Amino acid sequence: MSRPLEGKLAIITGSSRGIGAAIAENLAFKGSNIALNYTSPSSTEIAKDLAAKLTSAHGIKAIPFQADIGTPEGPANLVREVKSAFSSGDDNFQIDIIINNAGVAQNALLPDVTITQFEATYRVNVLGPLLLVQAAQPYLPKDRSGRIVNISSVSSSTGFVTQSVYGGTKAALEAMTRTWSRELAQNATVNAVNPGPVEGPMYASNADVFLEGIEGWIKHTPLMKAQEGDVKDESLPEGTRAARTEEVAGVVGMLCGKEAGWITGQVVCANGGMVMLH
């Protein structure tokens, strides 16, 4: 039986660990070949191990690529290297799926925000996705079968303290999502998902003032109420839990399927009900 994404090619930025790695697993399980992207040399072995695991487990082609999405040349270099590795030598090279997952957060209260923090965060979270889609556009499908999913955050709309910069980058990513859904309508659907707290070190590294401010939101999020057997996260209020990476990846994987072909320009909530858009 043919898998739903059999033979397709997905580029996933920031995919050596966390949500990105879970998305790679989801798409590989469905038959997609995977271009794993990572930035730091310290992630090289992790990315290589993940690529080998996906190739062995799912019979697909998975290759890791080091490229800094936050540099002017990084996204174009990534697309060029992916084309070299996955092209069969003819003119039929195609990028079917792009997941803009790479992101950084340098949170600070307003008096402490620096220009360096602002520029670094916007380069990775906003300019990087724009340049990647720009470089990939010539290789997108011509039949609307392409899928672009941008990983946003509830921070785009919640106004959490310390997130003047990070929240702004995610709001910008959502704005680009809507624009691209029109400009790329003949090539691909373009959507975003907006997770809240997700298991892993990124959330736990937030300052106490942020964790105190988000506590009420967490307690009122329907699916963050812990059930028996849920792993306790010390950075979360008692009786609550973060999203598992595979839960967010499942929403992304749904948007990459053929059945999601009539959804575009949307921010799809993948946050357990913390934010309910209409």
Image (cartoon, rainbow, N blue to C red):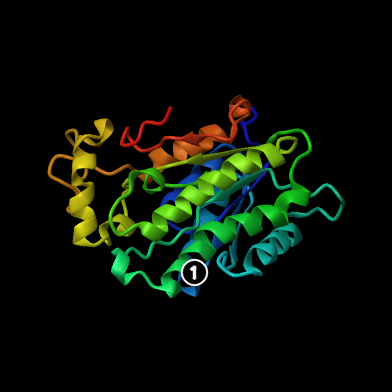
Q: Is residue 132 left or right of residue 213?
A: right
Coordinates of residue 168 in the picture (x, y in percent): 44, 54
228 up-or-down from 116: above or below: above
Q: Is residue 157 left or right of residue 179?
A: left
Q: Residue at x 42, y 70 (%)?
A: 117
Q: Residue furthest front?
A: 111
- Look at the image and tell me in which quarter the N terminus lies: top right
Coordinates of residue 125 in the picture (x, y in percent): 50, 58
Nearest the eye: 60 or 35: 35
Give the amino acid type for the residue marked by disc 1 in the picture: Glu
Coordinates of residue 180 in the picture (x, y in percent): 65, 43
Q: Residue furthest left?
A: 238
Q: Is residue 235 visible?
A: no
Q: Residue at x 68, y 66 (%)?
A: 77
Q: Residue at x 36, y 31 (%)?
A: 276
Q: How many marks?
A: 1
Q: Could you say whether the residue bearing mark 1 is in a helix, strand or loop?
A: helix
Nearest the eye: 48 or 158: 158
The quadrant in which residue 277 appears is top left
Q: Residue at x 20, y 59 (%)?
A: 209
25 up-or-down from 123: above or below: above
Q: Residue tagged by mark 1?
A: 119
- Look at the image and tell me in which quarter the C terminus lies: top left
Coordinates of residue 136 in the picture (x, y in percent): 71, 53
156 up-or-down from 225: above or below: below
Q: Alpha-carbon neighbours of circle 1 within 10 Å: few (<14), some, or many (≥20)?
A: few
Q: Is residue 138 visible?
A: yes
The quadrant in which residue 194 appears is top left
